[in-house]
Image (cartoon, grey):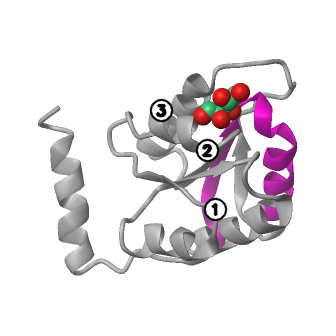
Amino acid sequence: MTMNTKRIVLSSDHAAIDLRQAIAAHVAAKGFEIVDIGPVTTESTDYPKHGEAAARRVASGDCALGIIICGTGQGIMMAANKVRGIRCGVCSETFSARMIRAHNDANMLALGARVVGTGLALEIVDAFLATEFEGGRHGRRVDMIAALEDQA
Ligand code: RB5
């Protein structure tokens, strides 16, 4: 599978509708298949359920990667990481976005719509989607993270 055939799930809370739509258009224009699971209005809504819904799409294998957004990115990231098999990091710059793929095999990216502007957010998304997991010693460490799920 090449990167451009990957299905990407997008979700947010009410704080990030505009940024989510900008990311959807940007990523679709690059040839990725977008699964945008909303919400569609700016009515106040609870970020945990949106983080979980996107995470389940990734954990089930329906989508290869996920991008989730709330005001800070923090709450929706915390919710997503409660789903078995999810490795999600919040990024506010591109270095971390590359590294969570390269070293941590992150399968979800969280963004804060009240933290980063649209231009930077799109660069962070590009960095995340363009980077592959390096494996090797990093694979052993990612396996250690997974093992923690059996000890909870
Ligand atoms: C909503 O006001 C806000 O709390 C939410 O978007 C997010 O920042 C939580 O982590």
Secondary structure found at label 1: loop
Q: Up-down: is 99 above or below 145?
A: below
Camera-side residue of 116 and 1: 116
Which secondary structure type mostly characterizes the magenta part of the structure? helix
In this orientation, does residue 54 appear? no
Q: CA distance from mark 1 to mark 2?
A: 9 Å
* Amino acid found under the numbered disc labelled 2: Gly
Q: Earlier in the sequence, mark 1 or mark 2?
A: 2
Residue 2 point in image, percent of width and height? 57, 75
Quarter of the image with the C terminus is top left
Say which of 24 and 20 sits in front.
20
Specify few, some or many for label 2: CA neighbours under 10 Å numbering under 14, 14-19, or 20 or more. many
Compared across the picture, whether 8 is left or right of 39 comes to left
The answer to whether mark 2 is within 8 Å of ligand 1 is: yes
Q: Earlier in the sequence, mark 3 or mark 1?
A: 3
Residue marked by disc 2:
73
The quadrant where ligand 1 appears is: top right
13 in the magenta segment: yes
Name the residue tied to disc 3. 79
Where does label 1 land, which residue? 92
Instruction: Residue 82 in the image: state x and y as whole percent.
Output: 37, 34
Disc 1 Cβ-to-ligand 1 distance below 8 Å: no
Secondary element at image label 2: loop
**Does the residue at mark 1 contact the one at mark 2 (Cβ under 8 Å)?**
yes
Stretch of the chain drawn in magenta: 4-26
Q: Residue at x 42, y 76 (%)?
A: 102
Mark 1, Cα crowd under 10 Å, few <14 / some 14-19 / many 20+, is many
> Quick one: label 2 or label 3, which is nearer the N terminus?
2
Asked whether, in this view, residue 4 is left or right of residue 62, the answer is right
**For residue 1, above or below residue 121:** below
Q: Please give the name of the residue rendered at 45% of the width and 67% of the height, measured from the top-left corner.
A: 100
Distance of label 3 from label 1 (alpha carbons): 18 Å
